[in-house]
Image (cartoon, rainbow, N blue to C red):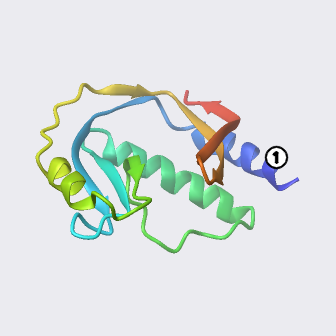
Amino acid sequence: NRLEEIYDGLQEAVDSIRPFQLKLQQVGAFPDLNRPRVFWINIDQGREALMTLQKRIEEILYARRFVREERPFSPHLTIGRVRSPRGLRTLTDQVRSITFNAQAFPVNRVVVVKSDLQSTGPIYTVLNHTNLV
């Protein structure tokens, strides 16, 4: 079962990763704020630790014959998706005016989540989790 291989790979990947802190910084959009499809919050503190974790997971899964993601990893927290252009300019103007000053929070596990996209919005199901040591 390929899912079991992923779970085993995650366990191996996190064996050398200690818990760390993340702090969120500014709001942005993919592909950009002029043509937003996804709104996100940038990661400030803990960015390097998160990138190290992602690289380790990718390397171990690649060694288990999983395909590498071709797009570069861009650590962020997705906060919303654009479903309709109606009211988009107003929303984008509001996003541009947001000032952000969040507290750091702990990252102490990796969670595998299944996302089922429905017409009413996504349904998320936790499949597995692995604690950082």
Q: Is residue 96 left or right of residue 102?
A: left
Quadrant where the C terminus sits is top right
The image shows residue 126, relative to residue 27, as above or below, that is above
| Element under disc 1 | helix
The image shows residue 129, relative to residue 68, as above or below, that is above
Residue 87 image point, x, y percent: 27, 57
Residue 89 image point, x, y percent: 21, 61
The image shows residue 33, relative to residue 52, as above or below, that is below
The residue positioned 41% from the left and 45% from the top of the image is: 50
Q: Is residue 45 left or right of residue 9?
A: left
In the rendered image, which quarter is residue 65 located in? bottom right
The residue positioned 64% from the left and 56% from the top of the image is: 60
In the rendered image, which quarter is residue 15 located in? top right
Residue 131 image point, x, y percent: 60, 28
Residue type pointed to by label 1 = Glu
Q: Residue furthest front?
A: 86
The residue positioned 22% from the left and 29% from the top of the image is: 102
Residue under circle 1?
Answer: 4
Task: Compare residues 59 and 97 and report the one nearer the observer.
Answer: 97
Q: Residue furthest bottom?
A: 70
The residue positioned 47% from the left and 72% from the top of the image is: 71
The residue carrying pointer 1 sits among few (fewer than 14), some (14 to 19) or many (20 or more) residues within 10 Å by Cα, namely few
Residue 59 image point, x, y percent: 59, 60
Query: How many marks overall?
Result: 1
Q: Is residue 103 left or right of residue 72?
A: left
